[in-house]
Image (cartoon, rainbow, N blue to C red):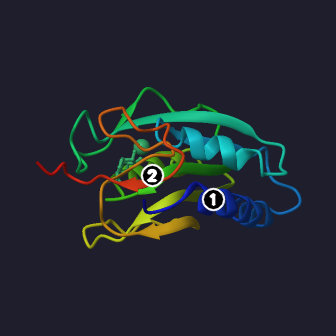
Amino acid sequence: MLVSAEQIAARVPVLAHEIAAALGPSPRDPVLLAVMTGALIFAADLIRHLPVPLRIALATVTSYPGTATSSQGARLKGELPPDLAGRDVLLVDDILDSGRTLGLLQREILARAPASLRTVVLLRKHAARSLPIVCEHVGFDIPDEFVVGYGLDYDGYYRNLPAVHAMVPATS
Ligand code: IMP
Ligand code: MG
């Protein structure tokens, strides 16, 4: 186990508080854009600590198809919400790894002229290969290991684990 359910439960309200403070007293029609599917659990916990009137939107990016454990390049599936212009956008993802996913989404969002863009991730891997991605709010820095749980999957499984675990190859 790398991050316990208790550590997450303690950190999420702190992140939400930071975000609310950064948005200020009069946010501009804020929209929380959660990256499916991994950010589902984190976003659900985070929004309940955000005392901000906001809307929720979803973006789907595929980068780890099936059993791959290293990024295969990010691709946007479907469209972003059409109405991001002039709004405060909060981009929420589970983990920053190579940065391809958030790099792609940040470019696409900024091209739509939002009032502001902030990015929050639960986890950030320390990897030399990472792109320099601006990420204002980070839950936990973790070692460069493949992790599952709290929304993160391996081939679609383990998202329902309450804590974050490193995948350890089976010994036989
Ligand atoms: P990036 O594009 O390489 O930064 O990867 C980000 C996306 O890949 C995240 O949104 C995750 O869904 C997925 N991902 C990255 N690292 C892991 C991991 O260790 N376990 C599970 N999914 C991961
Ligand atoms: Mg993801």
- How packed is label 1: few (under 14 Cα within 10 Å), some, or many (20 or more)? few
Residue toward you, 23 or 129: 129
Left or right side of 8 for 48: right
As displayed, is residue 82 above or below residue 69? above
Report x, y in % for residue 30. 74, 46
Assign a secondary structure to mark 2.
helix
Assign a secondary structure to mark 1.
helix
Left or right side of 82 for 74: left
State the residue at coordinates (68%, 36%). 56
Query: From this viewpoint, is residue 87 visible?
Result: no
Report x, y in % for residue 172. 10, 48
In front of the other: label 2 or label 1? 1
Could you tell me the amino acid type at mark 2? Arg
As displayed, is residue 53 above or below residue 141? above
State the residue at coordinates (78%, 44%). 29
- How packed is label 2: few (under 14 Cα within 10 Å), some, or many (20 or more)? few
Q: Which residue is mark 1?
A: 6
Report x, y in % for residue 63. 30, 41
Could you tell me the amino acid type at mark 1? Glu
Label 2 and label 1: CA atoms lie apart by 34 Å
Q: Which residue is mark 2?
A: 107
As displayed, is residue 43 above or below residue 12? above
